[in-house]
């Protein structure tokens, strides 16, 4: 276990370790305030665009289901007549300057999440270390709205609307800033978001609730689709290299499946040796994009379906039409 993983064990509730780290959190918080003030004052440049930019982010380190949410949001906006494009940092990828992600793109080059989004949506997806460059790249792809997968703290990219996601189970952890806690910004930052979303659990006043469920399974070799019910009474190995992999395992068990769980770190770079031998294997779609080149016909990816209420889409369109760019000083 790395030092970072040991520290993260103390992020859920205040402990002696997290309290001992609070002086470092105070320094982190001060740097964060100075950096944001530099963008507000114009000392650091904010890039603005002629089309709406919607940021989907969170205050905490780790996943809150942003990417599945972005996929569904893009699909729903497309149904309403928008032409969405998506931008991503491409975490653990090798891209520096902005590139468009092909559906058959290499996840080791572009990052696993951008490749997944490109395959699932069929929409233009751009990746760059600087998200503002990705937006510029998408302007050549005939899009009329951009969704940023993460990037709430990337103030160099102006935005028309902010959607902040909160995990219904973990919440804001112990409420401390990094490294004493999981927060990138203080909890008060939630108040300036246009839309607050709670994934799982009971939504608070002013929040929208979204749910995540498992869909069908797809064979990584043949492309065959199958219901999860077809895997009951079959010994299964389940792989997950995501934040909180036990959630994927729990959802499989809720479907009545018997699994042996194989958790891996988030964004794990899978190899053939990671695939259990002589067993039917279920994995997340994010992991599947990295396993396709060495997968056997025993390997299946399981889709995740995120339900977004119509009222949330209505609110987002209202914000886009009523406001220009978000005021960073709000």
Image (cartoon, rainbow, N blue to C red):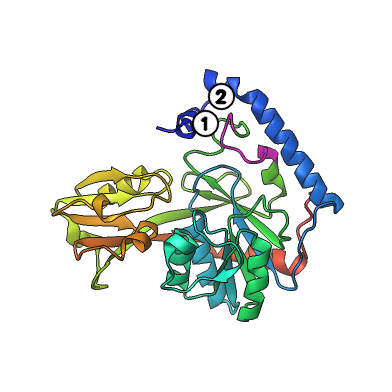
Query: Residue at label 2?
Result: 18
284 horizontally vs 300: left or right: right
**Viewer-proximal residue among 106 and 39:** 106
Do residues under tags 2 and 1 come within 8 Å of each other at their CB atoms? yes
Q: Residues within 10 Å of mark 2 (few under 14, many from 20)?
A: many
Q: Give the residues drawn in magenta, as a range.
A: 179-188
Q: Residue 273 placed where, x, y %? A: 24, 51
Q: Is 163 positioned to the left or the right of 240 in the image? A: right
Q: Quadrant of the N terminus?
A: top left
Q: Is residue 35 magenta?
A: no
Q: Residues within 10 Å of mark 1 (few under 14, many from 20)?
A: many
Magenta residues: mostly which secondary structure? loop
Residue located beneath label 1 in the image: 11
Image location of residue 227, percent across then percent down: 24, 65
| Residue pictured at 70% horizontal, 35% vertical | 29
Residue most toward the top?
16
Where residue 289 appears, as percent x and y from the top left, is 37, 63
Q: Is residue 319 in view?
A: yes
Question: How many numbered callouts?
Answer: 2
N-term mark: 2 or 1: 1
C-alpha span from label 2 to label 1: 7 Å
Q: Nearer the viewer, residue 215 or 208?
A: 215
Q: Quadrant of residue 194?
A: bottom right
């Amino acid at each position: 276990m790395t030092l970072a993983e040991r520290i993260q064990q103390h992020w859920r509730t205040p402990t002696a370790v997290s309290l001992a780290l609070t002086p470092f959190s105070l320094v982190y918080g001060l740097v964060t305030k100075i950096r944001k003030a530099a963008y507000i004052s114009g000392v650091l440049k904010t890039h603005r665009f002629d089309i709406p930019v919607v940021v989907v982010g969170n205050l905490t380190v780790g996943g809150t289901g942003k990417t599945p949410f972005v996929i569904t949001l893009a699909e729903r906006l497309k149904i309403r007549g928008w032409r969405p494009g998506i931008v991503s940092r491409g975490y653990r990828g090798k891209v520096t300057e902005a590139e468009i992600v092909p559906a058959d793109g290499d996840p080791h080059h572009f990052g696993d999440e951008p490749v997944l989004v490109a395959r699932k949506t069929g929409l233009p997806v751009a990746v760059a270390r600087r998200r503002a460059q990705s937006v510029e790249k998408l302007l050549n792809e005939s899009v009329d709205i951009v969704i940023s997968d993460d990037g709430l703290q990337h103030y160099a990219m102006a935005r028309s609307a902010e959607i902040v996601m909160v995990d219904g189970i973990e919440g804001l952890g112990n409420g401390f800033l990094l490294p004493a806690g999981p927060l990138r910004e203080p909890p008060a930052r939630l108040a300036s978001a246009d839309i607050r979303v709670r994934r799982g659990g009971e939504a608070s006043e002013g929040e929208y609730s979204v749910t995540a469920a498992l869909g069908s399974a797809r064979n990584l070799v043949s492309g065959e689709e199958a219901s999860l019910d077809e895997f009951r009474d079959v010994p299964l190995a389940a792989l997950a290299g995501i934040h909180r992999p036990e959630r994927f395992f729990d959802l499989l068990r809720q479907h009545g499946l018997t699994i042996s769980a194989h958790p891996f770190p988030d964004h794990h770079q899978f190899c053939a040796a990671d695939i259990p031998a002589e067993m039917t294997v279920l994995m997340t779609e994010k992991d599947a994009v990295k396993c396709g080149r060495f997968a056997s016909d025993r390997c299946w990816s399981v889709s995740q379906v995120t339900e977004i209420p119509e009222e949330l889409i209505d609110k987002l369109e209202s914000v886009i039409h009523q406001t220009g760019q978000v005021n960073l000083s709000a």
